Amino acid sequence: MKMNKRKINSLYIHIPFCNSICPYCDFTKFLKKTNFEDQYINELIEDIKKTQISFFKFNTIYIGGGTPSCLSNENLEKILIECQKLAKKGTEFTIEANPEDLDDEKLNLFKKYGINRISIGIQSFNTDTLKMLGRKSIDFKSLIKKVKKYIKNINIDLIYGLPNENIEVLKENLKKFVSLNCSHISIYSLTVNPGTIFFNKHIKEIDEDQNRLLYDYICSYLKDHGYDNYEVSNFAKNGKYSKHNINYWKCGNYVGLGAGASGYIDNKRYTNTSNLNKYLEHKDRLSIEEELTKDQQIEEYLMLNLRTKWGLNLEEFNARFGLDLLEVAKDYIQLLINKKLAIINKGSLCLTHDGIAIMDSILLKIFNLINL
Ligand SMILES: C[S@@+](CC[C@H](N)C(=O)[O-])C[C@H]1O[C@@H](n2cnc3c(N)ncnc32)[C@H](O)[C@@H]1O
Ligand code: SF4
């Protein structure tokens, strides 16, 4: 029987294993155990093969975690062979990695199977901060030099705003990041989520004022060094934006494979179980499937699009939802413009740096005005 293949922009694959569990982490992850890993990879390969039948090749593929780089080279190769069949010429193909995993053998494997973007979770260059985060301190300068021999497009993840960490640590971190000359940085303020060790130890997030101070510094320092703040927490040099993440922020469709992964197709969101046993035994693998109501779609569209420097295209919004935002929220949008919190650029409503900093309250007001 001939199957009709679907064209979907992006594919996300979740690898839920880590060599150790960090005290702040709230993602779907498990301490790596060889027998589980082998079983998981076999299941995942089945899912990737089904995807090859049901979907055309993707524009972006992202293998995230957990820690994909902690897989054995045999398992990584198995996955990458199948993923490569889903990549076309020019596909942005990203893998997440922890610094200590990146030896020449692994990097060579990534390159061999077409990975052209790597996201490295460095978190901090400060040894005290790394200790507090439960992370290893290594020679990051040599590491990046080595990675560049294989993959040019490098993102570095950093976390800021730890309790007791003063602004000098942030300044030093950003200086070190810039000296490595990488194309991209994602920098997040520490969040403390229930269920994590940090939460149980009553570690507190920094307050809003302190966060604003540090965030302002980050944006202005990175701008001065050629990094474009194209999304709240993401900065890129020379146009090396993450195409995969842009698809999320533009509310594009994506397929999600693996335990805990989500997918979004035709306004339906599905989430795979994050229970490893259920996933391995095919029991209730799909834990949630929901069709977003029109109100939910509008809410999400506003929330995600306004995070980016390209903002929300008013014509597209009107075509998608039959709602003229400039008409229904006219006075409020004018007020935002007068207060330099927003601009209209090429037919799009874009928040300025000051607008982004108070995005939650702006969104609430807009939701109110359009009766969400
Ligand atoms: C899902 S993690 C996976 C990457 C990889 N395993 C690692 O640890 O580097 C992706 C990124 O989310 C960020 N992150 C995770 N937990 C966080 C938290 N509680 N607060 C702020 N950022 C966090 C970190 O910067 C991390 O690199
Ligand atoms: S932060 Fe990364 S390495 Fe640490 S537990 Fe979470 S996914 Fe694993």
Image (cartoon, helix red, strand yellow):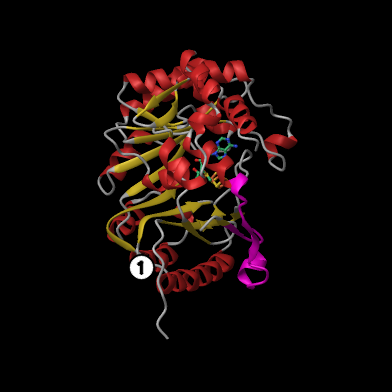
Tell me if residue 372 comes above or below residue 248 in the rendering.
above
Would residue 277 be found to the left or right of residue 345 on screen?
A: right
State the image quarter where residue 238 is shown.
Answer: top left
Badge 1: residue crowd in 10 Å (few <14, some 14–19, many ≥20): some
Residue at the image point whose x is 38% and y is 51% from the top: 94
Say if residue 180 shows up in the picture.
yes
Residue at the image point whose x is 72% and y is 40% from the top: 194
Q: Position of residue 1 (x, y in %)?
A: 42, 86
Q: Quadrant of ligand 2?
A: top right
In the image, farthest residue toward the front: 327
Q: Is residue 283 a member of the stretch shown in magenta?
A: yes
Q: Is residue 278 a member of the stretch shown in magenta?
A: yes
Of 204 and 315, nearer the camera is 315
**Residue at label 1?**
81
The magenta region covers: 269-296
Residue at the image point whose x is 45% and y is 45% from the top: 319
Q: Position of residue 335 (x, y in %)?
A: 52, 17
Q: Position of residue 365 (x, y in %)?
A: 62, 27
State the image quarter where residue 206 is shown.
Answer: top right
Q: Amino acid at mark 1?
A: Ile
In the image, farthest residue toward the bottom: 1
